[in-house]
Image (cartoon, rainbow, N blue to C red):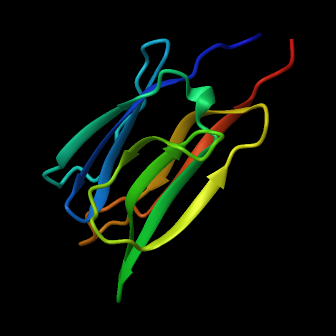
Amino acid sequence: MKSNVGIASMTFKGSPSSISSVQVTLTNGKKSDVLQKNVLDHQLEQTINFLDSAAVRSIRASECTDEDAAWIGNISFFDGAGQVLAEYTPFEEGGVTRTLRLEEGQELIGVYGFHRTGRSKAIRGLGFIVKVRLSQ
């Protein structure tokens, strides 16, 4: 069975220092569960609309740390030429950046992540789900 479902948008929320909530909406209108810590007052909402999720060729996120915590501060999506397609940047400082490059024929279709219980307000890690587009 062939699926033409992709990512239509991602809605991020955060504090001035981190990403604290993310939800994906697919091109078929279905929404993912919201990945967030429910005790927080989420701010700084931004929805990134993807005209073509296949155009996303790499994703870069900044990992920020202090003495007892780590969190995702910013996220950017790039096309094949390295140009920014979209970004969510609630955190003004840098952090260590990591880049995920999608291989030829791969398309971004989802996101997952985790947060810790306790005082940390942020999402601690994100992973991305890709599908392989089959040749016709």
Closest to the observer, 132 or 34: 132
Residue at image point 53% right, 44% down: 83
Closest to the observer, 53 or 26: 53
Q: Residue furthest bottom?
A: 67
Q: Which quadrant of the figure has residue 35?
A: top left
Report x, y in % for residue 30: 43, 18
Q: Residue furthest right?
A: 136
Residue at image point 28% right, 70% down: 120
Residue at image point 51% right, 67% down: 97
Report x, y in % for residue 47: 31, 33
Task: Give the total of numbered labels.
Answer: 0
Q: Which quadrant of the figure has residue 46?
A: top left
Taking 134 as reference, is 12 above or below it? below
Taking 136 as reference, is 85 above or below it? below
Taking 88 as reference, is 18 above or below it? below
Q: Is residue 36 visible?
A: no
Report x, y in % for residue 108: 61, 35
Report x, y in % for residue 38: 23, 49
In the displayed structure, does residue 71 sit left or right of residue 4?
Answer: left
Q: Is residue 123 visible?
A: yes
Q: Quadrant of the N terminus?
A: top right
Q: Quadrant of the C terminus?
A: top right
